Image: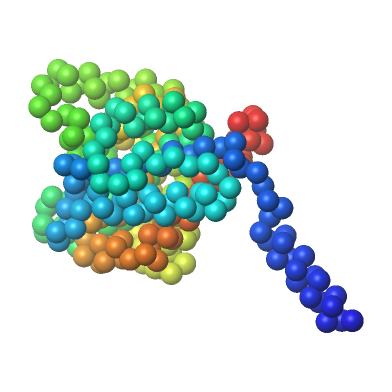
Amino acid sequence: MLKIIYGLSMAWLLLGCMGPGVDRSDSLIVIDAGHGGHDSGAIGAGLYEKDLVLRIAQKTADAFKDMGYNVYLTRDNDRFIKLSGRTKIADRKDAKVFISIHANAIANKSRFTKAEGIETYFLQKTRDAKSQRIAARENAAVLQGADALSKNVIIDSVLNGPKIIESNKLAIDVQNKIMKNVKSHYSDAKNGGVRPAPFYVLVGASRPSILVEVGYITNPKERERLFTSDYQKRIAKGIVAGATRYIDNRKKELGF
Ligand SMILES: [Zn+2]
């Protein structure tokens, strides 16, 4: 008898942990794997950012689907999509949030082993030199060939993003959960924090939008981890846990 009661209570506990099947199918998440096609993004030891972020984006999409969300990937293979088209997809699909996934790099070889860490960005103009440098690199595909005046026009248009506060909140939740997931196994993983930066891919987004820099592809230690399935899954699950926390809190606040 005791055994049966024990068995029943374990089953009940297990069901409780899994949740009573929360219906999240009304929430569409757009995941954007950075770069693609002729735009390889950053390169570290012959490995391409575009390939790494596609793998993480696919794992993130799978993890969102496991939670019952609807998911749309801006690219599911190695092709180039204009930056300006990426947030438009999120608008057209009426996504709840837009999450762009990138990997970081540093040009100065003497700093390859020093520059490391996971960072989450939201769209805002900043005076911080480091954030400006990273945004300039990620924006290169758009700004290439543009003259100084049009560069300023492009960067200034960044300021009109209506969702800065919401995006900041989403960035905080996602960054916290990624770090929690990664640090539970890689205790020395560096938390680069949440930062504002003028990323062109986030311009014009009419919904909460963030850009995750999953780590430095130029850092040997971080690169090795980034290209393992385990590390990629930890980042993916962190993104999903963070976005879920954000969406659940907004639902409570304003029927989001
Ligand atoms: Zn990138």
Check the image and report above or below for 92 versus 214. Answer: above
Q: How is the image coloured?
A: rainbow
Give the quarter of the figure containing the C terminus: top right
Looking at this rendering, what residue extends furthest in the right direction?
1
* Total marks in image: 0
Give the side of residue 228 with respect to residue 64, left or right.
left
Check the image and report above or below for 25 versus 148. Answer: below
| Residue beneath the point at 58% across and 47% down | 68
| Residue beneath the point at 48% across and 59% down | 180
Give the side of residue 18 with respect to residue 160, left or right.
right
Q: Nearer the viewer, residue 120 or 77?
A: 77
- Residue 120 rendering spot, x and y as whole percentages: 38, 45
Give the side of residue 28 with respect to residue 106, left or right.
right
Residue 2 appears in view: yes
Give the quarter of the figure containing the N terminus: bottom right
Q: Nearer the viewer, residue 73 or 175?
A: 73
- Residue 200 rendering spot, x and y as whole percentages: 28, 30
Check the image and report above or below for 149 versus 231. Answer: above
- Residue 192 rendering spot, x and y as whole percentages: 35, 51
* Residue 2 occupies quadrant: bottom right
* Residue 205 occupies quadrant: top left
Residue 218 appears in view: no
| Residue beneath the point at 80% across and 70% down | 9
* Residue 131 occupies quadrant: top left
| Residue beneath the point at 51% across and 34% down | 96
- Residue 75 rendering spot, x and y as whole percentages: 33, 41
